[in-house]
Image: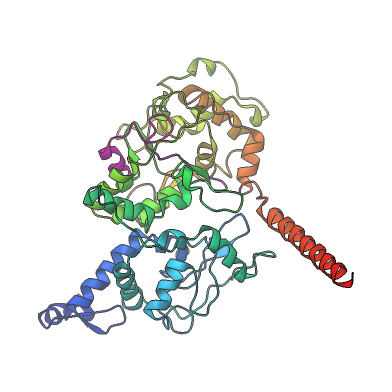
Amino acid sequence: MSARFAWRPLLLSAGLLLSSHGHAVDVDAAAQIERGRYLAAAGDCIACHTVAGGKPMAGGLAVETPIGPIIASNITPSKSHGIGNYSLAQFSSAVRHGVRADGAHLYPAMPYTAYAKVTDEDMAAMYAWFMQGVAPVNAAPERSTRLPFPFNIRLSMLAWNWLFLDKEPFKGDPAKSVEWNRGAYLVQGLGHCGTCHTPRNALMGEQASKLLGGADLGTWSAPNITSDVNSGIGSWSRQDLAAYLRTGRSAQRGQAAGPMAEAIDHSLRHLTPNDLDAIALYIKSVPALRDPSDSKPVTQWGQAGDRLAELRGVPLPKDLNRMSGAQLYDAHCASCHQARGQGSFDGSLPPLFHNSTTGRSNTNNLVMAMLDGVQRQGAGVGDANGYLMPAFRQTLSSEQLVSLGNYVQQLYGNPAGKVTLEQVTILRQGGAPSDLIGLVRGSLIVAGLALLLAILWWRRRKED
């Protein structure tokens, strides 16, 4: 036992505990710090503010957005490079309203539009943990945010906030149960589920009328998680959904990958069973939204099968880009997902049929899983690097991924879902470029011309 923790029983008997700074704090304060740690985990703060292998909350991670990468800041209690000089009011303003202590505006890659729902009490607990439970890192991230005009002018966020930021904290529905309200509070606030799962308009504001209806995130796709039976999670039981949120997989339903796997590993699996049940209860009550192309539940497409007959006596082509989907599947997938796509015997690797990834007409997640693999962190699963599925970005060409993806989709998934060479090429490059920059610049030009014409008209009237 280290010297630091050898004194823990004595400090407890004296009503004291040690903070991460080595200072004694009383038991009530320690309880608030621990509560703040839990809330920060619910908010998934570490996922964006910690680079792989870096110090917790020290920033530096590049968050890809339609207007360019935004570099997460150091939010440790460092007084020189972090938030160590923030008051509770300044901390609250940054987290809930997107305004730093120096008055500069944050970009909504930081989901302050969701965190605005957090109560004053929970904000105070989070502040206590950040100030006393996080080790200070006295260094700035190696990179800083550099966005193109006009987004490099942070004051421009005033207009965006006026349009899309609701500063009202969460208000419970007295007609609903305590559990439902707890789930609503977590989903709408710290869990910021709508940040990814709600589609956005041309100015990147969430479309409230399509809450949790699914959205593309550049490369990965956040699926519809409304209560619709076909397109959403209406066919999932509450227990199915809670188990998925805790473990990242649900038998005959789906498995987490990409950003959702990160959310589970860093955040959701650390929540209490009661909170996960509350989240599941609330999500299953969200009004249903359906994609007309989903003619049946996305988890009911496909069945076990193979095309081994196509391989017998057929040599590999000289041009490996012309390998058939069956050949590629047999070479790269069958050892884990089995020849008939039924998944591993222990259930850790899912079947490819009755799977929400292959059951959708949007095949981006299938392509991204093939490109980047499926990695889990800190969950005690996968290989030495946490990979449940290897990445084929360097192993398979884009042409091979198209053949393999369509083989999997046609045999095991929704046949309406197609994988194209253009799609794979775009996803390899990080996603399709956004037209947001051009839209905003064009709007500024139009507004400037309108203002100039108004001034000229006013001057002419004055002269007349």
Q: Is residue 218 magenta?
A: no
Q: Position of residue 173 (x, y in %)?
A: 29, 51
In the foreground, 92 or 11: 92
Specify the quadrant of the image occupied by residue 398.
top right
Query: In percent of the image, x 44 and y 45: which residue is there?
Result: 211
In the image, residue 122 sits, relative to residue 299, either above or below, namely: below
Instruction: Find residue 3 and report its image quarter.
Output: bottom left
Q: Is residue 228 magenta?
A: yes
Q: Nearer the viewer, residue 137 or 108?
A: 108
Q: Nearer the viewer, residue 464 or 50?
A: 464
Across and down, in percent, residue 455 comes to: 81, 68
Q: Position of residue 68 (x, y in %)?
A: 62, 59
Q: Quadrant of residue 241?
A: top left
Specify the segment rendered in magenta. 219-244
Q: Is residue 384 left or right of residue 206?
A: left
The relative height of residue 78 versus residue 93 in the rendered view (above or below) is below
The x, y position of residue 108, in whole percent, is: 52, 61
In the rendered image of this protein, does residue 209 appear above or below residue 401?
A: below
Residue located farthest toward the right when viewing the structure as drawn: 464
Q: Residue at x 54, y 28 (%)?
A: 417
- Location of the N terminus by quadrant is bottom left
Q: Is residue 175 left or right of residue 116?
A: left
Q: Is residue 352 visible?
A: no
Residue positioned 64% across, 70% down in the render:
153
Q: Choose between 360 and 251: the one closer to the eye.
A: 360
Q: Which quadrant is home to the C terminus?
A: bottom right
